[in-house]
Amino acid sequence: MGRLFGTDGVRGVANADLTAEMALGLSVAAAHVLAEAGTFEGHKPTAVVGRDPRASGEFLEAAVVAGLASAGVDVLRVGVLPTPAVAYLTGALGADLGVMLSASHNSMPDNGIKFFARGGHKLADELEDKIETVYEEHRTGAPWERPTGAGVGRVKSYDEGHEQYVAHLLSVLPNRLDGLKVVLDEAHGAAARVSPEAFTRAGAEIVTIGAEPDGLNINEGCGSTHLDKLKAAVVEHGADFGIAHDGDADRCLAVDHTGEEIDGDQILAVLALAMRERSALRADTVVATVMSNLGFKLALEREGLKLVQTAVGDRYVLEEMKEHGYALGGEQSGHVIVLDHATTGDGTLTGLMLAARVAETGRSLKDLASVMERLPQVLVNVPDVDKSRVGTSADLATAVTEAERELGSTGRVLLRPSGTEPLVRVMVEAADIDQARSVAGRLADAVKSALG
């Protein structure tokens, strides 16, 4: 069996790859593995379970809740909330684990299961491996030990979670947002209520788009993976800037008042300088992945800040931050972690912090983001190839060496298998966009030829 867990939980087409039976089995396995690890020792365990608005989340949530309760875990159902809200509530309520049902930025037919450990942190790789092993053992016939009578878990709704999370967001803002006009694109997702409420209560005038989830329209032509509507709305409404989330609102991208995109690297650069001013940027260091634009690294160096780079995936950014006590990290895609206030990427918090910086300085977001110049970067996704052989193909290694020789010191190449989808990502940076496109196209062809 291939590994079920990717870089961000278990993900697949709901009711095909990710079935109710799998959701139930993984939840029971998680409960048993955490119990064996001593997480539940001395008390009856509690889990926080939330979801995004996907239609499939309704039956998958029911399966997860049933699995946990059947394993003796009390369940607090918080309903439709962002992933970072479930992580926050897991910690704030002293729960033993959290479960989020979402496929993030993926299209509506997909869904996923993400587990959080006590405190709201993502599970360690070794625990995910153990859960997968135990799940597979019992899927093929090994009987579970099942509590009976008063030993089974109890289930109740926890409607207070929404207000608790919004209050937390507002409590950590360094200043109010009065005088700002902001367009919010909620991707018809999990932040459709939370984000507009938080921005409004913080003092901003808001315009919302993509804020009417019906279970079928999540990420459909909107949100952080489709910025055209947000760009048009910002210009149309004369807004100061716009904020876009993905389906589970752990990402944040922005658009300045002219309609230009502000990516995760630029957001990190703006927040890094703001946090340094408040003496909140520990060790004057930002953590990012190898996908970060070379211009980001050069900007930080110019400002006297340090950059630590990790493998792709916000879990690896977070691990580095926790290990060394860094306060700020994230990804170009818009996952931004402010570790003093969140245990995972939080799109609403990031948007609020960005808005607070604009309000505090009186400068436009375009001006603030000009601290870094993005070098031309081309990303090509190559589907339907054997992504497991990216690091072992001699033909592909030769193609990469030739590309690096052509780019020299003014660019770079990165090939990596996706952690959440069956494809290989080819990334090329160069001083010239035409060169970047040409090299990326040749490398994409090489990937198809070598791995197809």
Image (cartoon, rainbow, N blue to C red):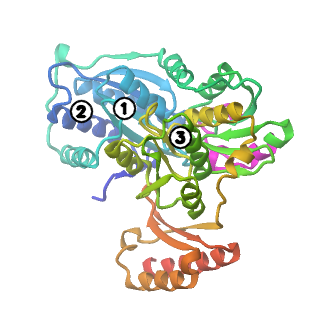
Q: Which residue is found at the position 65% from the left and 31% from the top?
A: 356
Q: Using the numbered discs, state the Cα–Cα distance from disc 3 to disc 1 in whole angstroms.
A: 26 Å
The relative height of residue 161 versus residue 218 in the rendered view (above or below) is: above
The residue under label 1 is 120
Residue 73 in sight in this render: yes
Q: Position of residue 419 (x, y in %)?
A: 42, 57
Dot 1, how many residues are within 10 Å of its Cα: few (below 14), some (14-19), or many (20+)? many
Q: Which residue is found at the position 54% from the left and 36% from the top?
A: 54
- SS class of the residue under badge 1? loop
The residue under label 3 is 276
- SS class of the residue under badge 2? helix
Q: Decide which of 70, 276 is in the foreground and name it.
A: 276
Query: Which kind of residue does numbered mark 3 sit on?
Result: Arg
Q: Position of residue 296 (x, y in %)?
A: 57, 57
The relative height of residue 434 versus residue 47 in the rendered view (above or below) is: below
Q: Is residue 217 left or right of residue 230?
A: left
Of mark 2 and mark 1, the one earlier in the sequence is: 2
- SS class of the residue under badge 3? helix
Q: Is residue 38 left or right of residue 52?
A: left
Of mark 3 and mark 2, the one earlier in the sequence is: 2
Magenta stretch: give its range: 209-233
Can residue 242 be found in the magenta stretch?
no
The residue under label 2 is 31
The majority secondary structure of the magenta stretch comes to loop
The relative height of residue 419 versus residue 321 in the rendered view (above or below) is: below
Q: Decide which of 100, 286 is in the foreground and name it.
A: 286
Q: Nearer the viewer, mark 3 or mark 1?
A: 3
The relative height of residue 365 versus residue 442 in the rendered view (above or below) is: above
Of mark 3 and mark 1, the one earlier in the sequence is: 1
Query: Which kind of residue does numbered mark 2 sit on?
Result: Ala
Query: Which kind of residue does numbered mark 1 sit on?
Result: Gly
Question: In the rendered view of the protein, which quadrant contains the N terminus?
Answer: bottom left
